[in-house]
Amino acid sequence: MPYRHAHYFVGFVLLVIMVGFWASYFSVVKAVPLAFHVHAVSSMTWLGLLIAQHLSIHKRMNALHKQMGLASFALFPFLILGFVMIINVSAKGFAAGDNPFYTYIAPAFGTAMWVAIAAYLTLFYLALKHRRNVRLHAGYMLATPSILFESPFGRFMDLLFPAWNFIGSEGPHAILDTIAISDGIAIVFAMTLYFMDRKHGAPWLVASGFMAVQAVLTWFTPQMPFMADLFAAYATIPEAVTLVVGLALGAAAAWFGWEAGKPPARKPAVA
């Protein structure tokens, strides 16, 4: 089976999440908004599911692997919902207009999350579409944590290794430096896997493309006034609408991916 040691990679991402978000989430878990709980629980459960799926298939527990695969259909829409809820928190802070930090940084955060949602939808759809090709299916599923990597690792780096920020922007923009650098590290990792097996490397190429777009677009968002206008327009959309759309997008990716992965119907025999 491919990616025999992938559970260590996913476990590493979980560790980075714990360290990176310890100060802002885990140590103050009772004092944070509901959106952060939904995002944290759904994202970490997704990583846990990937580890469990990986170990089960390598131990030839195929029935358990299939059951957890079906569980991903229920979990994935809530994963996307968590991303949307975080965007909405940033949108509220931006719309309030009483915090210079949010005024500057929130559109960039929103941009990063929009790209992340698009990446997750694409990767999960392709994982289901190619579920009959073990290497492609595994690759697309295991590429999803790379999209999640930039946010916790950026905080991890800012907390423990600030000297790694070789870009050196001042003020709030330094946070966007860490996002770009974290995406760059993840791209190097993904492209290494791509060149190790180019025949089945499409998942890592797709993930790298999304991360490159995320890094560049997020970093330059504060220099693009129309992005702030776009985020302001998003902030006017009723929250219930955005949440329903998020759930619907997650469910649609699952449904269309499953349908696309079905074998072609056999033509009736001609007498």
Image (cartoon, rainbow, N blue to C red):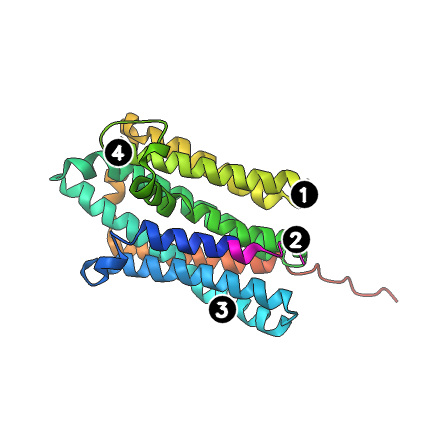
Q: Reading the chain from its start, which is encountered first: label 2 or label 3? A: 3
Q: Disc 4 on helix, strand or loop?
A: helix
Please name the residue shown 44% across and 34% down the image. Answer: 213
Please name the residue shown 27% across and 31% down the image. Answer: 173
Q: Marks 1 and 2: CB-CB under 8 Å? A: yes
- What residue type is disc 1 on? Asp
Quadrant in which residue 231 is drawn: top left
Q: Marks 3 and 1: CB-CB under 8 Å? A: no
Q: CA distance from mark 4 to mark 1?
A: 40 Å
Whether residue 71 is situated above or below residue 204 in the rendered picture: below
Q: Residues within 10 Å of mark 3 (few under 14, many from 20)?
A: few
Q: Nearer the viewer, mark 2 or mark 3?
A: 2
Whether residue 222 is situated above or below residue 79 in the rendered picture: above
- What residue type is disc 3 on? Ala
Whether residue 144 is situated above or below residue 102 in the rendered picture: below
Q: Which residue is mark 4?
A: 228
- What residue type is disc 4 on? Ala
Q: CA distance from mark 2 to mark 3?
A: 21 Å
Span shown in magenta: 1-8
Q: Which residue is mark 1?
A: 197
The percent coordinates of residue 99 (x first, y second) are: 14, 39
Q: CA distance from mark 3 to mark 1?
A: 29 Å
